[in-house]
Image (spheres, rainbow, N blue to C red):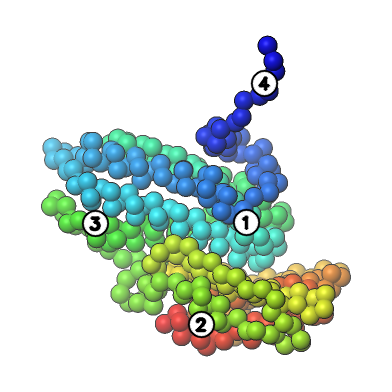
Amino acid sequence: MSDIGPLPVSRNSLLFDRVKAILTTPKTEWPLIDAEPTTIGAIYKSYVIQLAAIGPVAGLIGSLAFGYSIMDITYRPTIGSALGVAIVGYVSALVGVYILALVIDYLAPQFGAVKNRTQAFKIAAYGWTAAWVVGIFSLIPQLSFLAILGLYSLYLVYLGLPIVMKAPADRAMGYVAVVLVIAIVLSLMLGLLIAPLTRAFGPPADVGIVAGSAVVPGLAGTDNRTPAANKPPVAASVLQTALPATLPGGFTRTSLESASAGAGGFGGSNAEAEYTSGDQIVRLEITDMGSLGGLASLGGAMNIESSKQTATGYEKTGKVDGRLTTEKWDATGKAGTYNTVVADRFMVEAAGTAPSIDVFKNAVASVNVAALEAMAK
């Protein structure tokens, strides 16, 4: 008999292996995840899209098959209403991962970690595995209370964040604590915002209506007192127009790109340009985090300040002109980063290689901050 070689491994098998490993042996799995070359799109396609669907699909089937029972009363939603709830829940899960990754990435320099959006997305995606898997209990509504087991995801994030984002040991705990608080607040806010959206798919149940609002200090509100917070993200193409053609110091724009995710006030948008002057490169980026952009300024609300001096450079975080700002410089490699949060919504950042940190400060200053503040109103 001829040797036909090993059978190919299916995508489902790889997905199952990753889920099993991250849930049962996270301490050994996170270093593997950290070293994997990948992209945000690849993680979405191979992992997030499938796992985020577990809860909404299970809930759809369970509500139609069993209904919701309270004492001797059982309520079964219409197919349209149940489908609407599932769709909104699924979309919010996909967008929530993206937003959490943006926040993790933004906070990284403030805690001495390495700023890398793909690595941050690994934490947001793989760390939330438990919360998605327990969604299977929604198949039987009476077992939905077991969703509390999804809190194991907080432990997964706790283990993975210092490894994947390269946070120094003496500052990792603070980084983890802030991210976990944001993750919890994000989940609560998405839950509050989902309810009114699902009502668009059908009439409310006859057994009653639940309504409410929440205001978190330092964050955008979800009620009518903060209408600007409910505005959808600025279109990526509009953000592109805020990036200048040149920067002070003879830097000329050589590339321009943008991206967006989500819909309505739940999404985010981003525009980035690269500028060169000889062998020097500066990347200027504007990110709009939409209605939940206030999460990125949580550090400002908590009055976080830090300063670190090394033999070759420095790093500091604090408020400049009332805005949370991070500044980092390495004199040996002539590399630096300077970013600031505008209107508790837009993050403007310049990074790359240049003669001094002033190049990055001037790059950020070249963005029309007044125009960004007007967009947020």
Residue sticking out furthest to the front: 2
Identify the residue shown where x is 18% and y is 43%.
76
Residue receiving disc 4: 4
**Depicted 335 relative to depicted 5: above or below:** below
Q: Please identify, in this view, whether the residue under mark 3 or under mark 2 is nearer the observer.
A: 3
SS at mark 4 in the image: loop
SS at mark 1 in the image: helix
SS at mark 3 in the image: helix
CA gap between label 4 and label 1 equals: 37 Å
Residue receiving disc 3: 201
The tag earlier along the polypeptide, 4 or 2, is 4
The tag earlier along the polypeptide, 3 or 4, is 4
Judge by depth and name the residue closer to the eye, 228 or 316: 228
Badge 1: how crowded within 10 Å, few (<14), some, or many (20+)? some
Residue receiving disc 2: 372
82 displayed left or right of 300: left
Residue receiving disc 1: 118
The tag earlier along the polypeptide, 3 or 1, is 1
